[in-house]
């Protein structure tokens, strides 16, 4: 495997009207191609900030970071990643197909190829036949699947996901977790995933990055060696419960507000 994301001594301090806010401190991390890595930690610990640094949406104030061997800015310009936000962020006046098509239109892709890619990626997220529907005609879970299709439509190397299922009910969330694992197995993309949910992190990930409260630091990195075949009932197995307990303990031990 090759390293696709690497940080060394990464720091980020925001300057605000109330003074500086130290969001990330001494982040040292390597993510290899094809991994599914989740960031988990308490609210305000910098999980999303770290994801946004990878995506070139925030600029670090110290340390180094490379994405696909180049700077985050160069990786963004090379369209190395697709980004899935907490909300689906679909334009209500565009059909589902039109929303998925938007990045392709910006890239100057021909109409014929856009049509092919829309169909291919709708199939990937089990939304075939919904291209003419509008977002308001779909459930929240279906909208998020459409946003994943949009993020994949230009075939990026990586998928960056910021709590994409956090607002959904547990039944829908379980279903989408299963679908995301199948999608990951099909596409072999590198996935970096932010979540608050311990079961979700353990179910989906090859590794879990446990973060401590602000300034966000990596408290522990935990391997999830559960294999590729992960039905929902794997969550009742001793191995799953053991990893979940390790994550919970890591969160507890790293949960100090002394700084």
Image: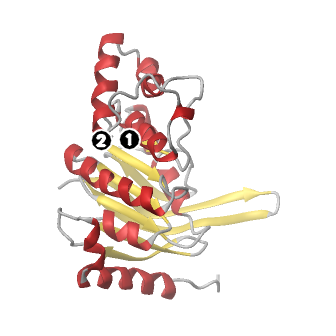
Quarter residue 227 falls in? bottom left
Question: Quick check: can you spot residue 62?
Answer: no
Q: Residue at x 45, y 39 (%)?
A: 147
Nearer to the camera, 241 or 69? 241
Residue 173 badge: none
Question: Quick check: can you spot residue 167?
Answer: yes
Relative to 66, is 242 above or below?
A: below
- Where does residue 73 sit, x and y in percent of width and height? 46, 39
Quadrant showing the C terminus: bottom right
Identify the residue at the far right of this view. 17
Relative to 70, is 28 above or below?
A: below
Q: Residue at x 35, y 38 (%)?
A: 80
Quadrant showing the N terminus: bottom left
Query: Dot 1 lies on which element?
Result: strand
Nearer to the camera, 172 or 43? 172
Quarter residue 234 falls in? bottom left
Residue linked to disc 1: 81
Q: Dot 2 surroundings within 10 Å: few (below 14), some, or many (20 or more)?
A: many
- Where does residue 168 sit, x and y in percent of width and height? 51, 56
- Where does residue 151 sit, x and y in percent of width and height? 40, 37
Q: Residue at x 56, y 73 (%)?
A: 42
Query: Is the Cβ of the residue at disc 1 closer than 8 Å to that at disc 2?
Result: yes
Nearer to the camera, 177 or 26? 177
Mark closer to the chain start, 1 or 2 = 1
Residue 157 badge: 2
- Where does residue 187 sit, x and y in percent of width and height? 23, 43
Query: Dot 2 lies on which element?
Result: loop
Q: Residue at x 22, y 65 (%)?
A: 230
Relative to 244, is 166 above or below?
A: above
Q: What is the spatial separation of the Cα atoms under label 1 and label 2, in whole angstroms?
A: 6 Å
Q: Dot 1 surroundings within 10 Å: few (below 14), some, or many (20 or more)?
A: many
């Amino acid at each position: 495997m090759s390293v696709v994301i690497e940080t060394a001594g990464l720091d980020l301090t925001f300057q605000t009207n109330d003074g500086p806010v130290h969001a990330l401190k001494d982040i040292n991390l390597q993510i290899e191609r094809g991994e599914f890595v989740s960031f988990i930690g308490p609210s305000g610990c910098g999980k999303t900030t770290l994801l946004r640094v990878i995506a070139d949406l925030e600029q670090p104030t110290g340390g180094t970071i490379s994405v696909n061997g180049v700077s985050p800015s160069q990786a963004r310009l090379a369209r190395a990643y697709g980004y899935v936000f907490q909300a689906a962020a679909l334009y209500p006046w565009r059909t589902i197909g039109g929303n998925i098509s938007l990045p392709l239109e910006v890239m100057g892709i021909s109409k014929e190829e856009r049509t092919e890619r829309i169909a291919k990626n709708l199939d990937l997220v089990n939304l075939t036949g919904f291209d003419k529907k509008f977002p308001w005609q779909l459930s929240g879970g279906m909208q998020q699947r459409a946003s994943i299709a949009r993020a994949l439509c230009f075939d990026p190397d990586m998928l960056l996901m910021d709590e994409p299922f956090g607002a959904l009910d547990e039944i829908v969330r379980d279903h989408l977790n299963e679908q995301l694992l199948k999608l990951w197995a099909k596409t072999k993309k590198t996935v970096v995933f932010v979540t608050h949910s311990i079961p979700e992190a353990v179910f989906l990930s090859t590794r879990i990055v446990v973060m401590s409260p602000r300034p966000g630091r990596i408290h522990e990195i935990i391997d999830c060696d559960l294999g590729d075949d992960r039905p929902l009932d794997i969550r009742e197995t001793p191995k799953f419960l053991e990893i979940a307990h390790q994550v919970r303990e890591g969160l507890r031990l790293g949960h100090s507000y002394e700084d």
